[in-house]
Amino acid sequence: MRPTYLLPALLACAACVAQPQAGPASQAAQACFWPSQVSGFSDAGPDRALVRIGTRETWELTLSPGCPDVDWAMKIGIKSRSGERICSGRPAELLVPNASGSGLRSCMVSSVRRLSPEEAAVDGQTSAP
């Protein structure tokens, strides 16, 4: 058999090999939400904010040090820095209105993760639509 005929056969066999299934850790790493799905938020202490997605999900945002407090904010914005959706393991940015009411302050989000229902219950319900 000529080597040029072997390559397509090997590629075909390689495609038949079973691929490992994505485990819970990799599925969690792919967890995402759209910014338009945010239905509420709350301040969760120094360098943390919680955002509510619909009625069933709560996500924790870990903010870079020196970010503005969100406890007084009536609204916030969030945007992805790598695509359109906010995902675990991807950079994001929190936008908080200035106290003067003009303009926004930007804050880097260093970590995004979806809370389990138990964790969300401990942290309490989010507020401020």
Image (tube, rainbow, N blue to C red):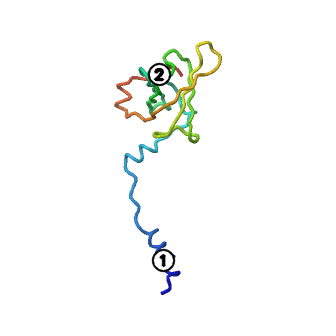
Q: Residue furthest top?
A: 100
Element type where label 2 sits in the image: strand
Numbered mark located on residue 9 in the image:
1
Q: Residue furthest right?
A: 102
Q: If you read the primary sequence from the N terminus, does the residue marked by circle 2 or circle 1 appear first?
A: 1
Numbered mark located on residue 42 in the image:
2
Query: In which quadrant of the rendered view does residue 57 lie?
Result: top left
In the image, 84: left or right of 63?
right
Where 29 falls versus 122 (above or below)?
A: below
Eye-nearest disc, 2 or 1: 1
Q: Amino acid at mark 1?
A: Ala
Where 89 falls versus 109 (above or below)?
A: below
Instruction: Choose between 83 and 27: the one closer to the eye.
Output: 83
Instruction: Choose between 112 and 32: the one closer to the eye.
Output: 112
Query: In which quadrant of the rendered view does residue 58 lie?
Result: top left
Residue 32 placed where, x, y %?
A: 49, 40
Residue 62 placed where, x, y %?
A: 44, 29
Real-space Cα separation, disc 2 to disc 1, in angstroms: 57 Å
Residue 16 placed where, x, y %?
A: 44, 69
Q: Amino acid at mark 2?
A: Ser
Picture residue at 45% right of the left edge, 32% below the top? 59
